[in-house]
Image (spheres, grey):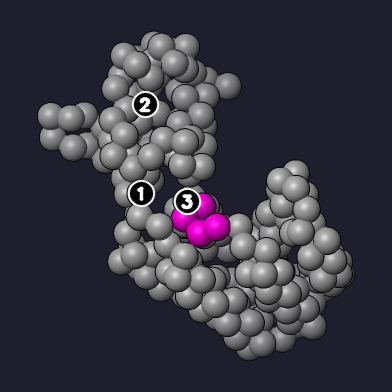
C-alpha cells in the first residue's frame, strides 16, 4: 500500500471514529511524524479527505477536521432516503433471494449481539455492513453503489454522535430484518417503505441524542 493510501486510511478512520474531533488542525509536520511518512504523501491524503468533506482548508490555520451539525444530519438523511430507498427497491428486483433471506435470519438473532460487550456489538455492525454490501452488489448499478459508499463515510460519524443505546439498536436490527425480508420476497415497494421507516426512526433517534462536539 502506498504511503498516501496508508495515511488516508489512518486519518479517515481517526476522523469517523471521533478520535480526531471537529476543529482539530491537521498540521503537516505533526501528522507526518505521527504517521511515519513524508509530507508529500500526507498532502495527497489530506486532499482526498477534503474531497470527501471530512476536512477543509481554514484560511491560515491549514487543514482542519469538519464538524457535523443538526442541519448537516437532516441533509444527509434526505439524500440517504433517496439513494437507499431506490437501492432497496432495485435489490428486491435484481438480488439473490436466498442471500437476503439468510441475512434476515441473522438480523433476527442480532439482539443477542447487541446486549453484550463491545466485540459483540462490533459483530452487529459488521452484520449491518454485510446487508449494505449485499444491496450494493444486488443493484448492479456502479454509480448508485459508489454514491452510497461515499455517503456512508459521513453516516458512520453521525452514528457515533448517538450513544449505542441497546433499545434503539434492537429496534434497528428488526428494521434491517424487515428490509432484508422484503428484498428476499422480491417486493420492491415494501423494501423501499421498510427502508424509509428505518431511516425516519434512525434520524429521530440521532437528533434526540445528538451531543454537539
User: Where does the image place residue 37, in percent across and percent down from the top left?
Assistant: 44, 13
Q: Main secondary structure of the magenta part?
A: helix
User: Where does the image place residue 103, in percent across and percent down from the top left?
Assistant: 81, 65
Q: Secondary structure at mark 1?
A: loop
Q: How many marks?
A: 3
Frontmost of labels 1 and 3 is 1
- Asked if residue 171 can be seen in this view, the reply is yes
Mark 2 — residue?
44
Tell me, yes or no, whether the highlighted magenta stretch contains residue 160. yes
Residue at (47, 24) in percent of width and height: 7
Mark 1 — residue?
213
Q: Secondary structure at mark 2?
A: helix
Name the quadrant containing residue 100: bottom right
77 vs 168, left or right, is: left
In this view of the protein, which residue sits in the foreground, 113 or 52?
Answer: 113
Mark 3 — residue?
157
Q: Vertical placement of 103 versus 26: above or below?
A: below
- Kindly report the distance in space between the C-alpha atoms of the residues bearing marks 2 and 3: 22 Å
Q: Secondary structure at mark 3?
A: helix
Amino acid at each position: 500500500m502506498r504511503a498516501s493510501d496508508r495515511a488516508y486510511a489512518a486519518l479517515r478512520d481517526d476522523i469517523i471514529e471521533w478520535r480526531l474531533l471537529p476543529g482539530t488542525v491537521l498540521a503537516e509536520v505533526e501528522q507526518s511524524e505521527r504517521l511515519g511518512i513524508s509530507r508529500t504523501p500526507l498532502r495527497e491524503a489530506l486532499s482526498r479527505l477534503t474531497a470527501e468533506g471530512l476536512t477543509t482548508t481554514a484560511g491560515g490555520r491549514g487543514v482542519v477536521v469538519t464538524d457535523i451539525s443538526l442541519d448537516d444530519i437532516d441533509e444527509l438523511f434526505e439524500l440517504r432516503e433517496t439513494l437507499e430507498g431506490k437501492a432497496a427497491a432495485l435489490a428486491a428486483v435484481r438480488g439473490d433471494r436466498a442471500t437476503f433471506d439468510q441475512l434476515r435470519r441473522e438480523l433476527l438473532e442480532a439482539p443477542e449481539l447487541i446486549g453484550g460487550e463491545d466485540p459483540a456489538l462490533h459483530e452487529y455492525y459488521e452484520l449491518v455492513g454485510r446487508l449494505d454490501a449485499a444491496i450494493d452488489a444486488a443493484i448492479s448499478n456502479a454509480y448508485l453503489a459508489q454514491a452510497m459508499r461515499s455517503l456512508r463515510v459521513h453516516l458512520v460519524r453521525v452514528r457515533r454522535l448517538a450513544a449505542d443505546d441497546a433499545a434503539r439498536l434492537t429496534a434497528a436490527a428488526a428494521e434491517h430484518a424487515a428490509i432484508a425480508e422484503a428484498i428476499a420476497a422480491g417486493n420492491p415497494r415494501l423494501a423501499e417503505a421498510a427502508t424509509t421507516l428505518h431511516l425516519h426512526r434512525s434520524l429521530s433517534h440521532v437528533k434526540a441524542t445528538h451531543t454537539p462536539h
